[in-house]
Structure formats: C-alpha cells, structure tokens
Image: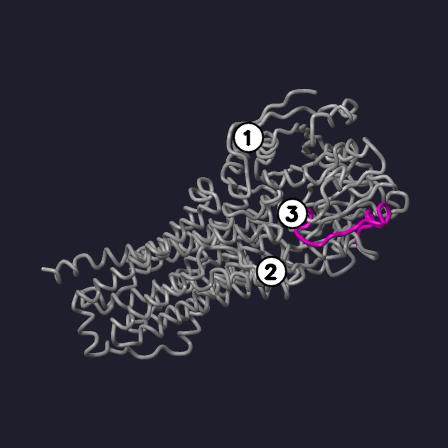
C-alpha cells in the first residue's frame, strides 16, 4: 500500500515543496535589499544591482542542479543536496557582512555585489537549485505525467509571486527586520525538510529506482540557434523588469513596494506562460499586447502623475514580458533537456539584468535600455494576421515627422524655436500620435513594430528639451543628473535660467546673469516654508552652524549669512562636482558659502560621526526619486538629528511629495520622541525671469529640540505655521517602515490636524 500512496501524494508534495522554496528565496530579495538600501542612500539602483546578484546566484544554483541531476543514483543526489543545504545554513542568520568595510560611494555597485555574495549568496544559491532539481527528480518517478514536469515550474513561479507580494503587503508592515530575519531562517529549515520528504517520495515511488538501471532517453541536442533564442527570450524580460522598476522608482522613490510589483508581474508571466492553459492564453495575449503598448507610450504624456504613469508602464511591461515568455515556453525541449533549458533561461536572465543594471549606466546617460528592451520584446511576437492598408503610410508619416524633430534639435535650438514658434507643441503632438497610430496599424509585423517603438521613444526624448537645452546629462549609480538651460531666443536680454533635475525631480535652479545668481529659487526661496524654516533657525544666534542633508543645486547656501558655517552631506559625487565645486553648473555654494565643508556619503551614517550639539540647524532635504529615503525619516534618525543639534537647535524636514503621505509619518516621529513640531505648506509664486520656478509649493516641518526653543523663533512674522498633531498609528523606525500606509494615505488624503500658534 505504501507505493500507491506515495505515487498519489507525490505531485502535491512536489508542488508544495517548489511553492514554499520559491516563496522563501524570493522573499529574501526585498528583505535583504531593505537592509542594504539605507547604506547607499536609498538609491533605486540598489534594487537593480541586487537583482543582478540574485539572478547570478540563481544561475549558479541551476548549474549546480544541472550537474547534480546527471548522477544516475538518485540517493546520491539527495545526500549531496542535503549536505549542500546544511553547509549553506552556516551563513545564517541574515545580516549585512562587514567583510568589505563601509560603503564605497565611488564604486557602490561593486561593493554591494561583494556584500551580497558573502552575506546571502550560499543559502540563496543552494535553495534556488530546488526548482530544476525537483523537476528532474519528478521526471524519474515513473508516474504517467513524469515525461512533462514543466507544469511544476508554474508552481515554483507561483510561490515566487506569493513570496514577493507577501513582503510589502504583510511581512514589512507586520514584522520588524530582526523578526523577518529570524522567520526566514526558520523557513529555510522547513524547506529543507520538505525537500527531503519529496526526495523520499520519489525514491519510494519506484520509478526512481528504475531510473538507476537505465538512463532516460536522450532527445536530439538543441541547435545553437535554438539556444540563442532561449537566451534572447529570457534576457529581454529580465532587462525590462529592471527598466520599469527604475522608471517608477525614479518618480516615486525606492521602496520594497515599488521593487516588488514589477518583479511579481514578471514572475506571473512565467506562471502563465508555462501553465497548461498557455496555448489558449497566447492568442489573447497577442491581441492585448498592442493596446498595452499604446497605454505605456501614452502614459508619458502624464509625466509627474504617479498612478497613471505606473499603471501604463506596468501594463505594457506585463504584456511584453508575457509575449517573450510564451515564446520561450513554445520552444522548450523534452524533459531530458530540462536542466539545460533552465540553464539557458537563467543565463539569459543574468545577461539581460547585467546589461540593464551594470552596463547601461556606463554606456548611456539616460534610461535608454528600457525602450530598447521594449522594442526587442516585439520581435518575439508571432507573425500573423493581415496588415491594414494604411500601415505603410503611417510608418512613412511617423518617420517624416520624427526626422523633422531630429533635424530641429541638431540645429541651434534658439533658431528652431523662432522658426516653429507656437507651433512647436503641435508638431510634437502630431509626431507622437502619428507614431502611436503606426504602432497599432503595424501590430502584426514584429520587426516593423520594434522599429516604431524606438521611433516613438525618440520623439519623446526629443521633446524633453523643447523649452531649452541640456548642458549636462550624466548617469551614475545614484540616478540621472541633468542641467537644463531655459531662455527666450526672441529676447536676448532675458537672463538664462538653469534647472537641476535628478531622476526627473527638480533639485534646484539658478539665474545665471550677474546680480541674480544669489537669489534662491524653487523650494529654497525665502518665501517658501522651507526657506522660512531655515531663516527662523538662523535668527536665534550668530554665527549659525548648519548641516544640509542633500545638496541639490545648493540654493540653501544663499539663505545663510557670511559668518554662518555650512556642512553639506551628499552621497552623489556628481552632484558635488556640479553644485559645490569650482567650474560646476551652479554657483550658489561657491558664491555664498565658499568655505563649506562637504562630506561625501550617506548622511545618516556620516552625521552620526559628528559631535553632539555640533549644529544649530539641520536641514533634511535628501530625496531619492520624489521622496525622502525612508531610513532618513525614522524615529532613530530624528533622534540622531536632535542629538546633533545645539540647545537652541531645530531640525527642518522638507516633506514636499506627490506619492507618499510623509507629513503624518513625520508627525508620528515627533510624537514618539515627545518633541514639538510645526508645519506649513507654502504656495508657489512666479518670478519675473523664472516663471513658476521662482518659488515652488513646499511643505516643511520644524522639529525643535525642546519647547523652550519655539519662543525664540520669529514665526509670528511668518504666518501659516501651526502645531501638527500626529494621527494614530505606529511610527516608522529602523525596524519598521510601512510604505503601503503612506501610499494609501497619499491616495485618499493626509490625516493630520493643525493647531495655530
């Protein structure tokens, strides 16, 4: 009776083991990246670089599984795998290794990859071998369906999907990082027990024993072209998932929620493509694909609006990845080539991820790898269906308009603006919508569609500088840094206006004409809430000692008096070069605080090394994407800032944000630390030479070291400041950060109360 029972239980046991193992290893990715992100300033590239590491570790696990599966004796395979899993457990519990010293801000990606390898490489690689290895064992059980174990791959990817979504939805909001690490360690041992149980079921079933007597039939080896096809079909979605993650994180900030959603959708496409209903799904996916692509492209007209941009990009990415993975599933070999197939799939994933996360920042000065991957995905569409009569005409019209726009950008931008004048926007929209029409009409022509996707993105990139010209555009680990000059070619006497953007977020601006260069602009104008807060803190005494967390264009330096002393904490060497060094694009620091001390590195780590009471005003103005990195806005972080302020000191938090409800989160921190907090939102206003960039709407919070400081601040002359009452809820800490709450509160409206002074 034991053998029939084992045969009946085997499929469920194998599926459960694969599900749990995948959920375990894929929950590790956001968990450990959550631990390392604060060390590198909360940059979105931390997740992308981590993704490359985990893909490489997955590849090592698959190579190991491929070699182990070649052993004829299944009992030997089981014994060796159990030993490897046990040895890998020596790296637990999870912790960030200090073997490579403090973070290297000149080569952050290399430092991060080394730390990941030492900290979690062994348990992740060992556990990741489970998926192909158990499928190979299942193929030797002697069951009727043993010849086609690929559907178990869907169970594995479903577990990955569940583990990823569980992290931001359940694990991060409910458990602190220490509890997360402990839970993962217990989960690792539970998965080992399940793997051993599945191996026992395979051995008892009888098929495995027969597999020792004769080898499985060997199908013909795949051709080099087929192997290259597998590499390409796996590499393109891997590059896409990193591209769409970077696109969203650059707008909204780098958090586990924005990391996990794209990766979960990526894994969902694997589940669907390798499911038994994939053949029925494929026609629907091909039909929906051009509509999703149009939605993605059209979302670029809504830049700055997180929800539609995120939904458009995720929809286009999902269908593009699904098209690739369906092509991959259609080309899969027989079961005896299973581990080889997974090796090439994993290798393609590593190559695509490495190209997007490591190579692209060195080669490109913008996120060009994303449109390139979207175009490449179109090549995996199956040809079919009639091509509408107007398809070729639409292509010619799109090419003509794109060529006109390119020529206008190659000549002097001022001349182009004078020639087309007010018709510039009309030309841009005409080119864009013509491209979209051509994309839709040529949806059945993969090569032509790929070219049209690139053409549409070219039009989008060409329109970015329609109001001026870029004098600097460079890309590094911490984001894309650009300086744009805006001027009126019809009025040569109008001052040139420079704007700094960092990953599409404005980080300051400056007028360049003599006599106007020291006027702080954007959020730092003296009339904004942030400008008022800094001036209020400096008014208490002279000289004032100011710590600026996040440099930007350096406009805050011109709020200080000559006798004041400024210390700047900035993580990005490129920002320091452009805004604080001689010959940079912005001169605020050089003109107003030439003796400023610049400290390179993560502000949280660096400011901890300063003497207690060293500053009178600490301004927290560091942004990753459109929000403050979460590790700079925890209870421990605010307590650190307050400890570093003098007895008359204040901490100023810049909380302007379009994606997360940070005001209530900051109020909770002040509540838990029992310190007074004042808040104000200031409106925007135009400047004669800078339009609405004169003073952007700003929300700022003043947190005083003690209530005795407040009467010293001249806030009565600055109307609008009020005490803020924190809403109920647990405050953020180093052990607990609830991003979904902040996102939800942003969508439905902030929840806090103000009491006038």
Distance from disc 1 to disc 3, alpha carbons, whole Å, reads 29 Å
- Label 3, secondary structure: give it: helix
Mark sitting earlier along the chain (1/3): 3
Mark 2 and mark 1 residues within 8 Å of each other at the beta carbon: no
| Quadrant of the image occupied by residue 732 | top right
- Residue 225 drawn at (x, y percent): 42, 76
Highlighted range, magenta: 585-608
Q: Is residue 214 above or below residue 429?
A: below
Mark sitting earlier along the chain (3/2): 2
How crowded is the residue under tag 3: few (<14 C-alpha within 10 Å), some, or many (20+)? many
Q: Is residue 356 above or below residue 469?
A: below
Residue at coordinates 65% horizontally, 37% vertically from top-left? 656
| Quadrant of the image occupied by residue 618 | top right
Distance from disc 3 to disc 2, alpha carbons, whole Å, reads 32 Å
Residue tagged by mark 1?
749
Mark sitting earlier along the chain (2/1): 2
Distance from disc 2 to disc 1, alpha carbons, whole Å, reads 35 Å
Residue tagged by mark 3?
604
Residue at coordinates 76% horizontally, 60% vertically from top-left? 411
- Residue 203 drawn at (x, y percent): 20, 67
- Residue 510 drawn at (x, y percent): 80, 45
């Amino acid at each position: 009776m034991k053998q029939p029972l084992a045969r009946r239980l085997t499929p469920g046991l194998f599926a459960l083991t694969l599900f749990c193992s995948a959920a375990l290893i894929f929950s590790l990715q956001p968990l450990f990246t959550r631990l390392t992100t604060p060390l590198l300033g909360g940059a979105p590239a931390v997740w992308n670089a981590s993704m490359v590491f985990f893909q490489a570790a997955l590849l090592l696990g698959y190579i190991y599984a491929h070699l182990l599966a070649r052993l004829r004796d299944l009992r030997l395979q089981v014994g060796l795998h159990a030993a490897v899993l046990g040895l890998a457990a020596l790296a637990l519990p999870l912790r960030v290794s200090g073997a490579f010293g403090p973070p290297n801000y000149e080569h952050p990606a290399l430092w991060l990859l080394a730390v990941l390898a030492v900290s979690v490489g062994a348990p992740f690689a060992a556990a990741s071998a489970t998926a192909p290895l158990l499928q190979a064992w299942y193929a030797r059980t002697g069951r009727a369906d043993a010849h086609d174990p690929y559907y178990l791959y869907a169970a594995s990817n479903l577990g990955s999907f569940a583990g990823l979504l569980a992290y931001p939805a359940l694990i991060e909001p409910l458990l602190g990082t220490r509890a997360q690490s402990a839970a993962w360690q217990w989960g690792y041992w539970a998965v080992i027990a399940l793997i051993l149980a599945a191996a026992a079921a395979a051995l008892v079933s009888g098929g495995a024993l027969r597999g020792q007597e004769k080898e499985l039939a060997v199908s013909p080896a795949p051709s080099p072209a087929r192997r290259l096809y597998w590499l390409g079909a796996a590499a393109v979605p891997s590059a896409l998932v990193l591209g769409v993650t970077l696109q969203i994180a650059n707008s909204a900030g780098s958090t586990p929620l924005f990391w996990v959603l794209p990766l979960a959708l990526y894994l969902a496409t694997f589940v669907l493509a390798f499911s038994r209903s994939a053949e029925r799904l494929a026609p629907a996916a091909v039909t929906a694909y051009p509509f999703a692509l149009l939605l993605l492209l059209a979302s670029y007209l809504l830049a700055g609006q997180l929800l539609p941009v995120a939904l458009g990009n995720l929809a286009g990415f999902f269908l593009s990845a699904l098209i690739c993975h369906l092509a991959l599933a259609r080309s899969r070999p027989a079961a005896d080539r299973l581990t080889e197939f997974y090796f090439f799939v994993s290798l393609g994933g590593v190559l695509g991820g490495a190209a997007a996360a490591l190579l692209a920042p060195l080669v490109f000065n913008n996120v060009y790898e994303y449109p390139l991957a979207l175009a490449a995905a179109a090549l995996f569409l199956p040809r079919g269906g009639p091509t509408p009569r107007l398809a070729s005409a639409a292509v010619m019209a799109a090419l003509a308009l794109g060529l006109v726009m390119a020529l206008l950008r190659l000549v002097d931008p001022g001349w182009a603006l004078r020639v087309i004048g007010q018709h510039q926007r009309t030309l841009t929209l005409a080119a864009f919508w013509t491209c979209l029409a051509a994309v839709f009409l040529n949806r059945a022509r993969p090569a032509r569609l790929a070219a049209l996707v690139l053409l549409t993105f070219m039009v989008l990139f060409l329109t970015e500088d329609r109001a001026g010209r870029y004098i600097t555009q460079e890309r590094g680990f911490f984001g894309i840094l650009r300086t744009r000059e805006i001027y009126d070619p019809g009025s040569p006497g109008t001052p040139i206006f420079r704007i700094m953007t960092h990953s599409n977020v404005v980080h300051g601006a400056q007028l360049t004409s003599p006599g106007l260069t020291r006027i702080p602009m954007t959020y730092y104008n003296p009339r904004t809430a942030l400008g008022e807060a800094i001036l209020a803190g400096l008014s208490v005494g002279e000289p004032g000692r100011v710590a600026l967390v996040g440099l930007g264009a350096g406009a805050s330096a011109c709020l200080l008096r000559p006798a004041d002393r400024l210390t700047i904490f900035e993580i990005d060497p490129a920002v320091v070069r452009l805004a604080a060094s001689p010959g940079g694009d912005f001169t605020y620091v050089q003109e107003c605080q030439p003796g400023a001390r610049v400290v390179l590195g993560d502000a949280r780590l660096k400011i901890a090394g300063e003497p207690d009471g060293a500053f009178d005003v600490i301004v927290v103005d560091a942004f990753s994407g459109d929000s403050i990195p979460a590790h700079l806005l925890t209870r421990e972080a605010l307590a650190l800032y307050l400890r570093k302020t003098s007895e008359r000191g204040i901490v100023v938090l810049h909380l302007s944000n379009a994606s997360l409800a940070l005001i209530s989160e900051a109020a909770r921190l002040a509540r838990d630390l029992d310190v007074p907090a004042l808040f104000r939102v200031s409106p925007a206003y135009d400047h004669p030479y800078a339009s609405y960039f004169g003073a952007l709407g700003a929300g700022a919070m003043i947190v005083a070291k003690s209530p005795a400081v407040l009467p010293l601040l001249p806030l009565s002359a600055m109307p609008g400041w009020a005490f803020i009452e924190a809403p109920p809820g647990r405050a953020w800490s180093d052990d607990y950060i609830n991003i979904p709450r902040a996102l939800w509160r942003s969508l439905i409206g902030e929840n806090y109360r103000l009491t006038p002074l």
